[in-house]
Image: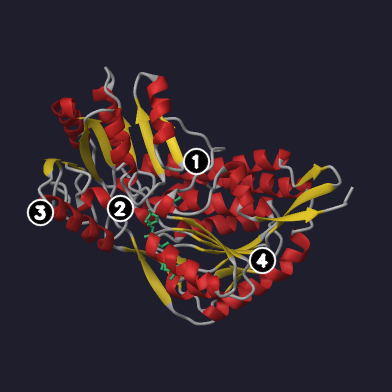
């Protein structure tokens, strides 16, 4: 049992002002894995005051001082990677290899990237007698989701620290453990009091108190579209900057070539990673209609081959995060059946032999782009395969969505992949598995309005000041 009942405010672990708690459920066992305190608006006031006080000095630190701190955090993070991985397994059910591997690795990657960017970042840019200065925006509210807890948290905290901002983190109630350990890491590394603060609790209370707070300068939010819209409205009254990283229904275009079966298999298995709970998941798989049977065979074999079970064991997929998420996914699978999509793998209910825990069957449909299962973000292991006539048609289907977060183009002809990638209306496109911590990540259209990762992630936390006649 993990009892995480204190908040981290002004450099110390403090009791919440009110004594409300909530259980955290392990989604693989349905048992209580721990408790957190649920904060109040009064806790937020305390944390914001601490962050405001600390901003005066932290914003004036030198590049070297910030690099020293990030280096110290790196050393502490390295010591606690196993604990972080274990916490992620318990809080959101990621399988061990993924939790200890990519989940924790993404956090480490963002930290390393922040260090690399900070080393050379141009805070001042001279243009003749004018200097364009980039200054920390101030006190930042960081509101994160449960699906990739270390990724979402680290991609905000480290650029915010590196740019001289102070912050209040509000982790998700469903996955609060790893954030608590991260706060311990920051404390052990010597983050000055008030620079980083963390309050656990519900989005409607803590998130709203942060978004509406007079003395918070910006909100960086990753999560669902409706909550993003609400935050934008809440923040409007105080004209604070809002960075939104929202949902997706990302197209994965498999080109018509010899690698089709391998690419379909890879895309299917990739979609099931993290139980499909990834904003950038390639959840619409676009394949040449003339080769649909071949694609179905490859996708079915790949989906049926995904091992599902106890995330502490050697499986490819654990449960989904909660009962509510399980129910939503089941309702989408039912919807797919109702609207006439052809089920080729998985389906309703839990996988055989798993009667406890929120396990979902790796599910693949063949459908059309107008179906609900192809238009709405399911956030579960449910893939829709859609046939295209030619490359123009593939691009048309890819762009026929309200989202624009990620896209994928896989094929042997790199020029064709490049051409397709240029035409897709999404903020992040991976060709044949390309991956880069320095590449900005964020959405077109209703997938958001900000960019995180790498140098672009720094700009989220910076104001721009023009100094005319400066020198
Ligand atoms: P949400 O329900 O939107 O929750 C995200 C965070 O916002 C949680 O910490 C939540 O608190 C908080 N929150 C809820 N209501 C709030 C309010 N009124 N004001 C301020 N904060 C509030 O999302 P989720 O279910 O955790 O995550 C899944 C969604 O995130 C999906 O749509 C997914 O696509 C998206 N996502 C996007 C990205 C990127 S980078 N674009 C990455 C990952 C996930 P609670 O603790 O109360 O839940």
Q: CA distance from mark 2 to mark 4?
A: 39 Å
Mark 4 = which residue? 11
Q: Left or right: where does residue 293 sit relative to residue 429? A: left
Using a 10 Å C-alpha cutoff, classify the residue at mark 1 as few (fewer than 14 neighbours), some (14 to 19) or many (20 or more).
Answer: some
Q: Left or right: where does residue 230 sit relative to residue 455? A: left
Q: Quadrant of the N terminus?
A: bottom left
Q: CA distance from mark 4 to mark 1?
A: 26 Å
Q: Residue at x 55, y 40 (%)?
A: 109
Mark 1 = which residue? 105
Contact, mark 2 vs mark 3 (Cβ under 8 Å): no
Q: Quadrant of residue 183?
A: bottom right
Q: Secondary structure at mark 1?
A: helix
Query: In terms of sequence position, does the residue under pointer 4 or pointer 3 come before the other?
Result: 4
Contact, mark 4 vs mark 3 (Cβ under 8 Å): no
Query: In terms of sequence position, does the residue under pointer 1 or pointer 2 come before the other?
Result: 1
Query: In terms of sequence position, does the residue under pointer 2 or pointer 4 come before the other?
Result: 4
Is label 2's Cβ within 8 Å of ligand 1? Answer: yes
Mark 3 = which residue? 338
> In this rendering, is residue 164 above or below 99?
below
Q: Which mark is residue 339?
A: none
Q: Left or right: where does residue 156 sit relative to residue 348? A: right
Q: Position of residue 86 (x, y in %)?
A: 42, 50
Q: Is residue 316 visible?
A: no
Q: CA distance from mark 2 to mark 3?
A: 17 Å
Contact, mark 4 vs mark 1 (Cβ under 8 Å): no
> In this rendering, is residue 340 above or below 56?
above
Query: In terms of sequence position, does the residue under pointer 4 or pointer 1 come before the other?
Result: 4
Contact, mark 2 vs mark 4 (Cβ under 8 Å): no
Q: Position of residue 348 (x, y in %)?
A: 13, 51
């Amino acid at each position: 049992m993990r009892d995480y009942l204190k908040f981290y405010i002004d450099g110390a672990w403090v009791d919440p002002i009110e004594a409300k708690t909530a259980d955290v459920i392990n989604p693989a066992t349905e048992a209580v894995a721990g408790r957190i305190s649920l904060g109040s608006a009064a806790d937020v006031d305390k944390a914001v005051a601490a962050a405001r006080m600390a901003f005066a000095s932290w914003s004036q630190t030198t590049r070297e001082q910030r690099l020293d701190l990030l280096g110290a955090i790196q050393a502490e993070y390295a010591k606690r990677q196993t604990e972080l991985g274990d916490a992620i397994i318990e809080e959101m059910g990621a399988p061990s290899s993924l939790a200890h591997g990519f989940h924790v690795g993404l956090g480490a990657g963002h930290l390393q990237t922040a260090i690399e960017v900070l080393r050379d970042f141009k805070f001042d840019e001279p243009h003749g007698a004018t200097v364009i200065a980039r200054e920390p925006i101030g006190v930042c509210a960081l509101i994160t989701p449960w699906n990739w807890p270390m990724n979402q948290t680290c991609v905000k905290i480290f650029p915010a620290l590196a740019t001289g901002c102070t912050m209040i983190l509000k982790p998700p109630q469903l996955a609060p453990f790893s954030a608590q350990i991260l706060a311990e890491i920051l404390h052990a590394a010597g983050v000055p009091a008030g620079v980083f603060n963390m309050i656990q609790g519900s989005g409607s209370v803590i998130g709203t108190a942060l978004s509406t707070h007079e003395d918070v300068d910006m909100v960086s939010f990753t999560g669902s579209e409706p909550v993003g819209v609400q935050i934008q409205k809440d923040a409007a009254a105080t004209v604070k900057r809002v960075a939104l990283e929202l949902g997706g229904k990302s197209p994965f275009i498999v080109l018509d070539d010899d690698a089709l079966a391998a690419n379909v298999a890879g895309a299917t298995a990739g979609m099931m990673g993290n139980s499909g709970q990834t904003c950038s998941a390639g959840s619409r798989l676009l394949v040449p209609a003339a080769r649909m049977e071949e694609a179905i065979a490859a996708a079915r074999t790949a989906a049926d081959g995904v091992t599902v079970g106890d995330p502490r064991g050697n499986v490819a997929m654990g449960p989904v995060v909660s009962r509510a998420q399980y129910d939503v996914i089941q309702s989408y699978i039912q919807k797919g059946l109702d609207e006439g999509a052809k089920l080729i793998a998985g389906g309703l209910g839990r996988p055989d032999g798993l009667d406890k825990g929120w396990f979902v069957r790796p599910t693949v449909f063949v459908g059309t782009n107008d179906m609900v299962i192809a238009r709405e973000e399911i956030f579960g292991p449910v893939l829709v395969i859609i046939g295209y006539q030619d490359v123009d048609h593939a691009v048309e289907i890819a762009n026929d969505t309200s989202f624009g977060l990620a896209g994928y183009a896989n094929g042997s002809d790199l020029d064709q992949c490049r051409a397709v990638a240029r035409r897709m209306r999404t903020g992040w496109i991976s060709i044949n598995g390309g991956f880069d911590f320095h590449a900005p990540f964020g959405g077109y259209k209703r997938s958001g309005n900000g960019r995180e990762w790498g140098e672009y992630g720094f700009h989220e936390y910076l104001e721009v000041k023009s100094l005319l006649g400066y020198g």
